[in-house]
Amino acid sequence: MTDGPGDREQPPPGWSPTQPPAYGAPGPWAAPNDPGSYPPPPPPQHGGYYPPPPGGGYYGAPVLKPGVIPLRPLQIGDLYNGAVSFIRANPKATLGLSALVVTVAEIVTLAIQLPLLGAFADAAVLSEDTARDNPELILGPALSFLGGTLLGAVVTTIALVVLTGMLTGIVGRAVFGEKISIGAAWDMAKGRVLPLIGLALLQSAIVFGVFLVPMGLLLLLTAAGLPFGATVVLGLILFVGGVCLAVFLYTKLSLASSAIVLEGIGVGAAMSRSFRLVKGDFWRVFGILLLTSVVAGLVATAVSAPFSIFGSLGDPTATFDDTRFYITAVLGGIGAIIAGTITNPFSAGVTTLLYADRRMRAEAFDLVLQTEAVERQQGAPGTGHENLWRQRNPWP
C-alpha cells in the first residue's frame, strides 16, 4: 500500500529545494560526520581535469616533480623553466646534438647559396645602362638566388624538424629526471626520422603553397589585363590572407612532430592529432609559440651580431670582390650555427612541453604521469616511456 502524502518523511524546517546547502555545510538529512556532509569537489575543467586547491596538490598533497616540470597542467613559466632545465640537465645530448644538426644544415645551405649569391652580386654591380639594355643579366641571377633561398629554407626546415623530433625524446625522459646520451637519443628517434622528414616536407609545401598559389593567380590576372590599382589591392588582400592562413596552419600543426616521436604514429595521424590537441586552446598555443619565437630570435640576433659586424669591417670605399663576399657569408654562417645551437633546444623543449601540457588539459594525462612517477618512487618498473606516452585519455 502506497504511503499517502502525510506519511512521507518531511525535510527539516527551513530547507528549500531551490537553495542548496552552502559549500562545506552538511546535507539536509546527513549527520555532521556522515559521508554526505562532506563538501562536493569543485567543477571539472579542461575536459575533466579537477583543479587542485591553492596548496598545490589534490586536497593539500604536494605536486609531484620528479624531473624538469611539475606533473600538472603547466603555465608559461613552467614551460620556459622546464625548457631551460632540460638543457642544463642534458647539455651534451641537447647542445651537442643541436650543434651537429645545425652545422650540417648550414654547410648544405651555404653550398647551395654561395654560388648563386656570387652570381647575383656580380649582376648587381652592372652599370645602369647595361642593366637597362640587357635585363636578363639581372633577372636570371635574381630568380636563381630566389630559388636557392627557398631550397635553403626547405633544408633548414627539414633539419629543424628532425632535430626537434630527436630532442623530443630527451624531453620525454627529462620529465622523470632521466639523462641520456646523444647515442641514446638517436636510438630513440632514428625509427621516426622518415616520418619527421615527410612531415617537414608536407609542412613546407603547405606554407609555401599558401603564398605561391595566390601569387600565381595574381600574375595570371595581371597578364590578362587587370588594372594596376586592382592588382595592388588584390595582391595586398591575398598576402594578408596568406599570412593568416599560414599562421593558422603552423599553429595547428605545431604539435605533430612531438606526436610522431612520443606516440609512434604516422604523418597523417600526427597532423590530425595535433589539430585535435590544439582545438579549444588555439590562441594560447599561438601566443606561446609567438613569444618563444620572439625570445629565440632576440637571442639569436644578439649571438650572431658580432660575426655580422666583423664581416662588414673594412674600407667601405673599397671595390667589392668575391673574396670579401665569401668571407662575409661564411662568418654569417658561423654566427647562425652558434645561435641555432643555443636557441633550437630551447624552442624544441617549449614545443614538447606544450604538447605535454595540452594532453594534461585535454586528456587528464597528468594523472597518468603521476601514477607512473609514484610507481617508480615505490620501486616498480613502471609502464615504460614508449608505452607511457602512447596512452590516451583513461577516463570514459
Image: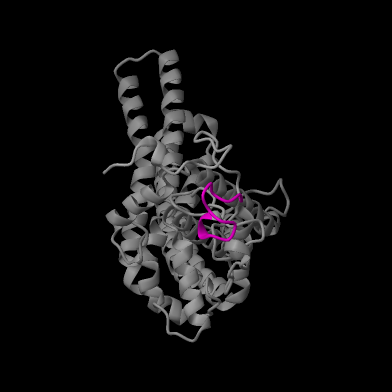
| Image height of 374 relative to 347, above or below | below
Residue drawn at point x = 26 percent, y = 44 percent: 1
Q: Which residues are magenta?
A: 24-36
In depth, the one of 344 and 55 nearer the eye is 55
Residue 29 at x, y percent in the picture = 51, 49
Residue drawn at point x = 53 percent, y = 35 percent: 16
| Image height of 213 relative to 168, above or below | above
Residue 164 at x, y percent in the picture = 46, 63
Residue 25 is covered by the magenta coloring? yes
* Residue 63 falls in image quadrant: bottom right
In depth, the one of 391 and 251 nearer the eye is 391
Residue 53 at x, y percent in the picture = 62, 56
As drawn, is 286 to the left or to the right of 214?
right
Report the colour scheme: one colour
Residue 198 at x, y percent in the picture = 31, 58
As drawn, is 243 to the left or to the right of 316?
left
